Image (spheres, rainbow, N blue to C red):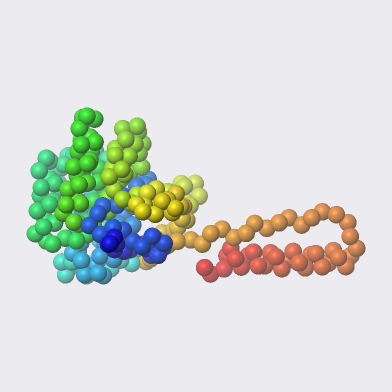
C-alpha cells in the first residue's frame, strides 16, 4: 500500500494526497519564487504531526526563523522545544553565502546521516540541495546523484529538496538527473514584471493524468502559499447595430448587469 504524508501546502494535499513518506521530492524555481516558503509549509506540517524536523540552509538560521514567523509558521516554539532543528551550512564551507557555489567536504553526508539517526529526524529540508548533488567531473555526476537519492530512500526520511532554476546546460543536466530519481517534482514560477506566480506539477508518480497542471498562487504574509481562483470569464463586447430606443435601453441595462456580475467574480472575496 502506498504510504503518503501531507506536504503542508493545502491545495496540493487535497489534489494529490501529499508526498510519499520516506522519499525525497524536488521543488525548483527562481530566486524569490517561493521555494523556501514551500519548505516552511512542509516543516510546519511535520511539527504538527509530531515529527522531528531538520532544515539545512545556505541562509543564517536566525534569518530563516524570522522569515518563517513572518509567514505565520510559528517556528520559534518548535525550535525551543527541539522538534525543529534549523542549521546553516558551516562557516568553513567555501562560498556558503552563495547557494550556487557551495562545496561541501566529502564526509558531510555521513555527518548528516548520523544526525538524522541520532536525532530521529523524520522530515528533512535541504534548501538548497546543490551542495549535495553537484560534483566536479561530468562522468561521475549521474552516479553521484543516484547514490545520493538512494541514500535518502534507505534512511527513510521524508525529504524536500530545493534547487534553483537551471541557468546553463550543465545546471539543466543536473536538474534532470535529480528529477529522474525522485517521485515528485514541482516548479514555482514568478513573472518579475507582473509578479504572477504559477506552480507547475512536472512529475507525480502514479498520477500521470495530473502531471503538467499549472496552479496560480500567491504568497501572503501570515499565511504563506495560497492558491488563487481561476480567472473570471471574459466580458463580451456589446454587438454594434441599430435598434429602437427601448431595445437600446434594455441592452444597456443588460450590459450593466453583466459588468456588475463580472466585477463581483473578479474582485469579490474569494
Q: Residue 2 in the image: x percent, y percent?
A: 29, 60
**Is 16 in front, or is 169?**
16
Q: Where is the N terminus found, in terms of image quarters?
A: bottom left
User: Residue at position x 31%, y 32% from top?
Assistant: 170
Residue that appears at 64% across and 57% down: 234
On screen, 267 above or below 134?
A: below
Residue 23 percent location from the top left of the image: 25, 54
Looking at the image, the residue that sits furthest to the front is 1
Residue 241 relative to residue 69: left or right: right
Left or right of 247 in this view: 71: left
Residue 223 visible in the displayed image: yes
Residue 83: percent from the left, percent from the top? 18, 66
Q: Residue at x 23, y 48 (%)?
A: 58
Against 144, residue 214 (above or below) is below
Q: Point out the residue furthest to the right here.
A: 244
Q: Nearer the viewer, residue 183 or 164?
A: 183
Amino acid at each position: 500500500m502506498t504510504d503518503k504524508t501531507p506536504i503542508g501546502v493545502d491545495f496540493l494535499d487535497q489534489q494529490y494526497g501529499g508526498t510519499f513518506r520516506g522519499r525525497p521530492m524536488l521543488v525548483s524555481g527562481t530566486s524569490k519564487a517561493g521555494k523556501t516558503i514551500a519548505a516552511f509549509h512542509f516543516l510546519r506540517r511535520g511539527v504538527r504531526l509530531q515529527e522531528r524536523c531538520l532544515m539545512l540552509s545556505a541562509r543564517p538560521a536566525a534569518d530563516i526563523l524570522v522569515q518563517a514567523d513572518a509567514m505565520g509558521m510559528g517556528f520559534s516554539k518548535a525550535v525551543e522545544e527541539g522538534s525543529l532543528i534549523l542549521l546553516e551550512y558551516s562557516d568553513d564551507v567555501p562560498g556558503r553565502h552563495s547557494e550556487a557555489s557551495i562545496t561541501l567536504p566529502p564526509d558531510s553526508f555521513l555527518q548528516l546521516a548520523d544526525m538524522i539517526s541520532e536525532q530521529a529526524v523524520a522530515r528533512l529540508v535541504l534548501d538548497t540541495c546543490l551542495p549535495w548533488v553537484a560534483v566536479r567531473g561530468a562522468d561521475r555526476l549521474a552516479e553521484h546523484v543516484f547514490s545520493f537519492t538512494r541514500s535518502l530512500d534507505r534512511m527513510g526520511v521524508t525529504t524536500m529538496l530545493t534547487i534553483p532554476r537551471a541557468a546553463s546546460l550543465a545546471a539543466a543536466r543536473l536538474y534532470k538527473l535529480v528529477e529522474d530519481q525522485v517521485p515528485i517534482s514541482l516548479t514555482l514560477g514568478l513573472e518579475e514584471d507582473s509578479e504572477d506566480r504559477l506552480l507547475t506539477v512536472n512529475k507525480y508518480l502514479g498520477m500521470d493524468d495530473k502531471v503538467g497542471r499549472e496552479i496560480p498562487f500567491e504568497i501572503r504574509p501570515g499565511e504563506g502559499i495560497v492558491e488563487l481562483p481561476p480567472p473570471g470569464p471574459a466580458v463580451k463586447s456589446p454587438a454594434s447595430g441599430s435598434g429602437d430606443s427601448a431595445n437600446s435601453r434594455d441592452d444597456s441595462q443588460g450590459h450593466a448587469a453583466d459588468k456588475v456580475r463580472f466585477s463581483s467574480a473578479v474582485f469579490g472575496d474569494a
